[in-house]
Image (cartoon, rainbow, N blue to C red):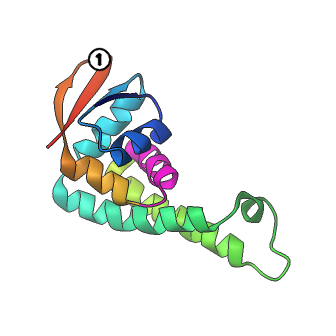
């Protein structure tokens, strides 16, 4: 079972489908590579921040972000918490924080990112693509 991925949603689906081989192409491959090469200790720090950020973003509908809530600032506070957690994760992941968030939000949580890091290894990479294999 092979998959070719160019977006966070495609990568999420390939990982959830437990594809044996995943080819990540285009600019998205650099973002996935940045997530894969973060050290274990740094990933632990980033994962904790990403968990908070992903949870906040999922819990905050776009409408709450764009308009002030009628009964108070609950939606705005959740969004602010997500922004703060994103900033913390960015200190470790740098430019990979955006793709990590996109993948986590598309998947509904941090689990898919942990699976990407723990259960897939890089077997081939070049300027055009990155090939991941299930361990």
Q: Position of residue 26 (x, y in %)?
A: 41, 22
Comparing 91 with 31, the one in front is 31
**Quarter placement of the N terminus:** top left
Q: Quadrant of the C terminus?
A: top left
Query: Mark 1 — residue?
Result: 127
Magenta span covers which residues? 96-109
Image position of 56 (left or right of 29): right
Check disc 1: other Cα within 10 Å, few if <14, some if 14-19, many if 20+. few
Quarter of the image for residue 133 reads top left
Q: Nearer the viewer, residue 40 or 3?
A: 3
- Whether residue 98 appears in magenta in the rendering, the answer is yes
Residue 21 position within the rendered picture, expressed as x and y whole percent measured from the top left = 25, 32
Q: Residue at x 33, y 60 (%)?
A: 46
**What residue do we see at 37% from left, 36% from top?**
31
**Left or right, 29 with reference to 62:** left
Secondary structure of the magenta portion, mostly?
helix
Given residues 15 and 85, the one toward you in this image is 15
Please give the name of the residue rendered at 18% of the width and 52% of the height, measured from the top-left corner: 39
> For residue 113: magenta?
no
């Amino acid at each position: 079972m092979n998959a070719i991925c160019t977006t966070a949603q495609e990568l999420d689906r390939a990982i959830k489908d437990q594809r044996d081989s995943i080819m990540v192409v285009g600019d998205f491959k650099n973002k996935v590579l940045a997530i894969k090469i973060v050290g274990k200790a740094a990933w632990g720090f980033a994962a904790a921040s990403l968990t908070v950020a992903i949870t906040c973003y999922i819990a905050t509908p776009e409408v709450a972000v764009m308009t002030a809530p009628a009964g108070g600032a609950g939606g705005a506070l959740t969004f602010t918490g997500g922004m703060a957690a994103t900033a913390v994760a960015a200190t470790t992941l740098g430019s990979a924080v955006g793709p990590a968030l996109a993948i986590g939000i598309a998947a509904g949580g941090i689990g898919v990112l942990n699976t990407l890091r723990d259960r897939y290894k890089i077997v081939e990479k070049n300027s055009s693509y990155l090939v991941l294999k299930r361990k």
